[in-house]
Image (spheres, rainbow, N blue to C red):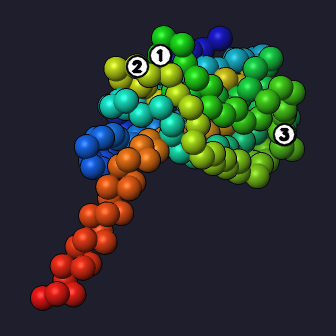
Amino acid sequence: MVSMARNISVAALAAGMACAPASAALVQFMHTFVNTSGAAQDFTFTVSSDVAYSGQSLFDIQGSLALNLIDLNGNGATVSTNGVPMYVASIGSVNPTVVQTIWNEPWSFGVGVYGNGVPQDQVFAAMNVPVTPEAVQPLSITIRLRLSARDMVTVSGTFQAAPVPAPGAIALLAMTGVSGAVRRRRR
C-alpha cells in the first residue's frame, strides 16, 4: 500500500461577523496515482487545512470528487474502493467528525484497451452540520482507492466548511444594516 499525507493550508478566509469571529476553509487537490507494479495496488492520500475555531458549532459544508482513469498497458483499467469509501471528508483531529463520504463500498469504474474515462463527478452540500469544538479544526480529505496494474488515475476533490453565524450575530448584522439605511435617508 502506498500512503501519502500532506498538511496544506489551501485557503483560510477570515469572516469577522459581529463579535463572533470565525473562519471558513477550503481544501482542494489534484493528484495522479500511477501503479507501476504488476498487480492491483491500494493507495491512500490525505490532504488537510487548519480552520481557526471561535466557538462555532455548526458549519455549512460542500465538496466534490472527480477522476480520470487511463489504461497504460493495453488490457483495460479499473479503479475501485477496497473495503472503505474512496472519499472521506472530515473535520477535527482528536475525534474527527466524518461529514461526507463518496463512492462507498462497493464501487468500481473501468475503461477498455488503451482507453480513458471519466465517471460522473460527485458533488455534495449540507447545511448546519454539528462539529465538536477544538482549538483548531483541521478540514481533511482522505482518498483510498485500488488501481489496476500498470495504469493511471488522476483524482481531484474539494471540501469547504463555513461556520454558521450565531443567531445574535445575524440579528446584530441585520440591525446594523437597517440603522445604516435609516441614516442614509435622513441625509
Identity of the residue furthest to the left in this view = 187
Q: Residue at x 67, y 49 (%)?
A: 123
Q: Give the residue type that dot 1 points to.
A: Ser
Q: How busy is the neighbourhood of tag 1: few (under 14 within 10 Å), some, or many (20 plus)?
A: some
Q: Relative to residue 72, is residue 20 drawn left or right?
A: left
Q: Give the residue type that dot 2 points to.
A: Glu
Question: Which comes before the other along the chain, label 1 or label 2?
Answer: 1
Vertically, is 107 above or below 11? above
User: Of tags 3 and 1, which is closer to the observer?
Assistant: 1
Give how far across and how far down residue 57 sits, in percent.
47, 32
Q: Which residue is mark 3?
A: 110
Q: Relative to residue 125, is residue 51 drawn left or right?
A: left
Q: Which residue is mark 2?
A: 134
Q: How busy is the neighbourhood of tag 3: few (under 14 within 10 Å), some, or many (20 plus)?
A: some
Q: Residue at x 80, y 17 (%)?
A: 83
Give how far across and how far down residue 53 sits, in percent.
35, 30
Question: Which comes before the other along the chain, label 3 or label 1?
Answer: 1
Q: Give whichever of 171, 35 is nearer the camera.
A: 171
Give how far across and how far down residue 77 sits, in percent.
80, 35
Q: Give the residue type that dot 3 points to.
A: Gly
Disc 1 on helix, strand or loop? Answer: loop
Q: Which residue is mark 1?
A: 93
Can residue 89 be seen by looking at this rendering? no
Q: Are marks 1 and 2 in contact (CB under 8 Å)?
A: yes
Give the alpha-carbon distance from disc 1 to disc 2, as whole Å: 8 Å
Q: Give whichever of 150, 146 is nearer the camera.
A: 146
Which label sits on residue 69?
A: none
Question: Which comes before the other along the chain, label 2 or label 3?
Answer: 3
Disc 2 on helix, strand or loop? Answer: loop
User: Of tags 2 and 3, which is closer to the observer?
Assistant: 2
